[in-house]
Image: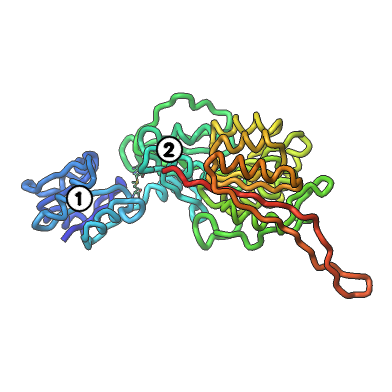
Amino acid sequence: MITVIGLDGGPLPPQAARALSAAVCVAGAPRHLEAAGAHIAGGAERVAMGELGAALDAVVGAGGPAAVLASGDPGFFGVLRSLRARGADPEVVPAATSAATAFARIGLPWDDAVVVSAHGRTGSGRGVRRALAAALAHPKAAVLTAPGRAGPGAFLPELLRAGRRVYVAQRLGAPDEEVAALAPGDEVGERIWADPNVVVAVDPERAVAPAMAWMPGHQGAPPDWALPAESFEHRASLITKPEVRALALARLAPRPGTVVWDVGAGSGSVAVECARFGARAVAFERTSEDCERIRLNAHAHGVDVEVHEGEAAAAVDAAAARLPPDAAFIGGGDDAVASAVVAHRPERVVAALASLDRIAPLYDMLAAAGYAPDGTQLQASRLSGLPNGSLRLAAANPVTLLWGTRAASA
Ligand SMILES: C[S@@+](CC[C@H](N)C(=O)[O-])C[C@H]1O[C@@H](n2cnc3c(N)ncnc32)[C@H](O)[C@@H]1O
């Protein structure tokens, strides 16, 4: 029998203490072996976890009762998955997960929080990027960090820049536990943080959702999407029409953990809808007046959209250096703008074109950049009432939607 025991700094429950004293083999991180050392039988083999696989193999093949020590709840981003993968059917004695403890220290409910792990496997930075995108898109988030490149330094600058209050909950349950509170404007520089730690980010205006949540994290697809043009403030009908927006959203695939650009955003309707789907939305527009309108539209829909003012070709370069896009919608701008967007290699590019002249060049540009281009012309005729009470079809201008996808890098 294998018993997996979670530790959170509190006293060991009797079931855990009994399992530990009976174990012939106990595996755990050195700090956990030390913390529970008094309960481990003298003759038991102690396997200090460095390489997880070898330690778990030792436990599974122990030939007698064995125990694994883990942090918090072993069933939450923990060792239980790897043990199960080895065919083990362990007993679990959980402790409080570090995310719960972090929110408890701050005194906030967390049933409305999104909890993400930055423990990426590939080392490509994708784990960090998607955790950051999810944390930026949600008003309340906890990030399980990893030492090194996925530590607090990878998250704090962007979260603070987005106006979040940020907490770094370090070594929870240990005698040297510390929770640092940071606010926008605080200098974090090269500060060293103690491992392990959890980063909590909270939008101060939405720190406590008014109604009790029923499901933690993002709530999935919004109740309505492809919203009517009247749902947005817009200038001179410069707005992607709902029929076109519906297909654009389908091709952009906005969801938690993704960054979606809306380039030449106009009203920002695409950015706002992407944010409603849980993506980190970034909008680009030329004038301060248009940018302000996008912010108002985002606010009216209860989402946060990062807005960049200026010439799109230069603005996207600056934004990509901080948080590269997973998907990009090109609603405005010329071929130079499209080329600047494609240069940042989003997995998905979607463009809405009114001008026929631009279709072939952009199609070719996508193909040359390694995308599989595709497209369709959309011509909607909407039902509209006539004065006599009957219905007619009111034609909207045709629009060509082009899109391209490329294989995701690891
Ligand atoms: C692989 S996850 C394991 C999570 C664990 N199962 C739990 O429920 O907390 C490891 C991450 O959890 C967080 N963590 C675990 N123990 C912690 C502690 N004592 N203090 C702060 N964060 C902790 C850190 O973000 C760490 O990198």
| Structural distance between the alpha carbons of marks 2 and 1 | 27 Å
Q: Secondary structure at mark 2?
A: loop
The kind of residue tagged 2 is Gly
- Which residue occupies 48% across, 44% down? 130
Camera-nearest residue between 108 and 385: 385
Coloring basis for residues: rainbow
Residue 137 relative to residue 154: left or right: right
Furthest-left residue in this view: 43
Percent x, y of residue 259: 56, 44
**What count of labels does the image hold?**
2
Q: Secondary structure at mark 1?
A: helix
Q: Is residue 222 visible?
A: yes
* Category of crowding for the residue at label 2, using alpha-carbon neighbours closer than 10 angstroms: few (below 14), some (14–19), many (at least 20): some
Residue 21 relative to residue 125: left or right: left
Tag shown at residue 125: 2
Q: Is residue 295 visible?
A: no
Dots 2 and 1: beta carbons under 8 Å? Answer: no
Tag shown at residue 270: none
Ligand 1's quadrant: top left
* Category of crowding for the residue at label 1, using alpha-carbon neighbours closer than 10 angstroms: few (below 14), some (14–19), many (at least 20): many
Percent x, y of residue 240: 73, 51
Residue 25 relative to residue 369: left or right: left
- Which residue occupies 55% across, 42% down? 346
Camera-nearest residue between 355 and 108: 355
Q: Looking at the image, is mark 2 or mark 1 nearer the viewer?
A: 2
Tag shown at residue 56: 1
The kind of residue tagged 1 is Leu
The quarter of the image holding the N terminus is bottom left
Percent x, y of residue 179: 43, 37
In the displayed structure, 105 sits above or below 315; it is below
